[in-house]
Amino acid sequence: MTNTTDLRQRRYVRPVSEHRETFDAVVVGSGPNGLSAAVAMAQGGASVLVLEAAEEIGGGTRTAELTLPGFHHDVCSAVHTTGILSPFLRSLPLEEHGLRWIVPKASVAHPLDDQPAVVMWHSLEQTCDELGADASSYRGLVAPFLENADGFFSDVLGPLGWPERPTTFLRFGLRAMWPATTFARWRFQQSRARALFAGCAGHSILLLGQPFTAALGLIFSIAGHVEPWPVAAGGSRAIPRALAGVLEQLGGQIRTGIHVTSAADLPEARVYLFDTSPDQLSSIAGDALPSGYRRRLGRYRYGPGAFKLDWALDGPIPWRDPRCREASTIHVGGRLEEIAASEAAMFRGRHPERPYILLCQQSELDPSRAPEGKHTGYAYCHVPGGSSVDMTEAIENQVERFAPGFKDRILARHTMSALDFQRYNPNYVGGAITGGVADVFQLFTRPVARLDPYSTPNPRVFICSASTPPGGGVHGMCGYHAAQSALKHIERVEPGPLTT
């Protein structure tokens, strides 16, 4: 599925005159999808320019000292479950450009009140040992997908179409179609396996009683037994920096501090790829897109947002079950019923007192994230879209519930509300960090229903953001697939300004 064309040097910028230059492709936005689109275009022989509004590339993969000097926090994405499994990213020499994955012993720890935490270890059998009477059921659920995991993720991380491995994908679909709550109660007898599955399904940012929410629970469970959920050494910023290194080796260019607000801000090119939200695509492209298509973009649903906390800590989080320190990610929320209730309240416009929390422990794996003896902490919960409510107390109370003494270790904190996320990155409309609702009505028809979801009615305009299949996550596959679509058209159009 993935084009692994050899890297090659060439000159891509072709001056048209002393004051004007033209490109084969211009990419707006330098998140992982935008950079992946640019790399794939350059591999196909195109001259490429990436424009980024911020002074630093990366979009949702930046790292900064948000709390105190020496504490390096991932601003948005932190643990890269699909990044290490991405068919496209795996085809690139990213390690030659500074990317190093650090893998934990366990992907997930899920603390519970009245018993030890349940841990998703890399080893399937070791994980089954955590699950008592549900061991054989969990093994039977996950094991068939591990036989050809690369092929499975190649199909999952693509647009809707005939899968390369139809039998495996049918097996997945028959399980994925269920609501997560229904599936977990049917599949598992006891609270431990149900909680572990619910925590994984909660990444969907949907009502867990909705159809197809079992899909994320299954995908994340399988992923943890293929490659433990990793962090990037030195911070998530290492990912875009490595992609930029590959792009520059291919002759592509990146320009930061260029805020594109209309087609007039764009240099001449054959094709344009937008690593933006659908509303930004509509606003920038303007009359270059038909009014009917723009109205359809305007109906795109972004859904809930996120509230995030970063902590500078005086030591590791004192989990009641110390095995939690072995995992890169902690799902904090208790039993299946509690997680489902939290997500239901959020989805209906309320802020739960006991929110379901995704907590990451980067400094447990990567000591460079904090001064010696200190640690960083990262946690977020889901909130209604556009929320400005401060969830600090609710989040810290939940962590304290499973890690008594946690609050005493906080040296400083940094908060980001849903509105702060939108101000930080306009792609996160209302704080929607995954690029929009991924329910059954919008999973494969994002941003609008088209046979080619990356194309638009204008054969020179494409969208490559997380608002296209396969959706959110640092995997670059939205950008890769959009580039394949654009490369099919690039020879049919002449370079020029973006117009109708």
Image (cartoon, grey):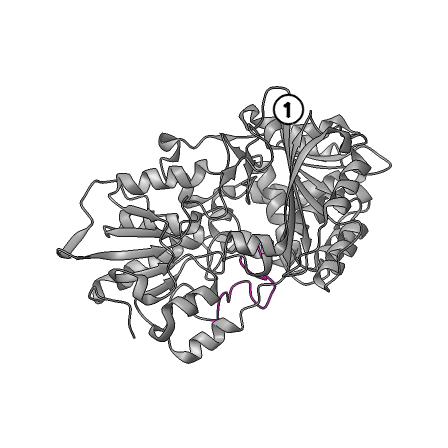
Residue at left offset 62%, top offset 41%:
143
Query: Which residue is farthest top?
Result: 372
Which of the two residues, 387 or 201, is positioned nearer the viewer here? Answer: 387
Q: Is residue 6 left or right of residue 296?
A: left
The quadrant holding residue 181 is bottom right
| Mark 1: amino acid | Lys
- Residue at which label 1 appears: 374
Q: Name the dominant secondary structure of the magenta segment.
A: loop
Q: Is residue 238 left or right of residue 137?
A: left
How far across and how far down the image is residue 9, in percent? 21, 40
The quadrant holding residue 6 is top left
Q: Secondary structure at mark 1?
A: loop
From this view, report whether residue 212 is shown above or below residue 329: below
Boundaries of the magenta span:
432-449
How far across and how far down the image is residue 421, in percent? 57, 52
From this view, report whether residue 179 is shown above or below residue 477: below
Give yes or no for residue 416 being in the magenta stretch.
no
Which of the two residues, 259 or 208, is positioned nearer the viewer here? Answer: 259
How far across and how far down the image is residue 459, in percent? 31, 69
How far across and how far down the image is residue 262, in percent? 36, 66
The quadrant holding residue 213 is bottom right
Give yes or no for residue 441 being in the magenta stretch.
yes
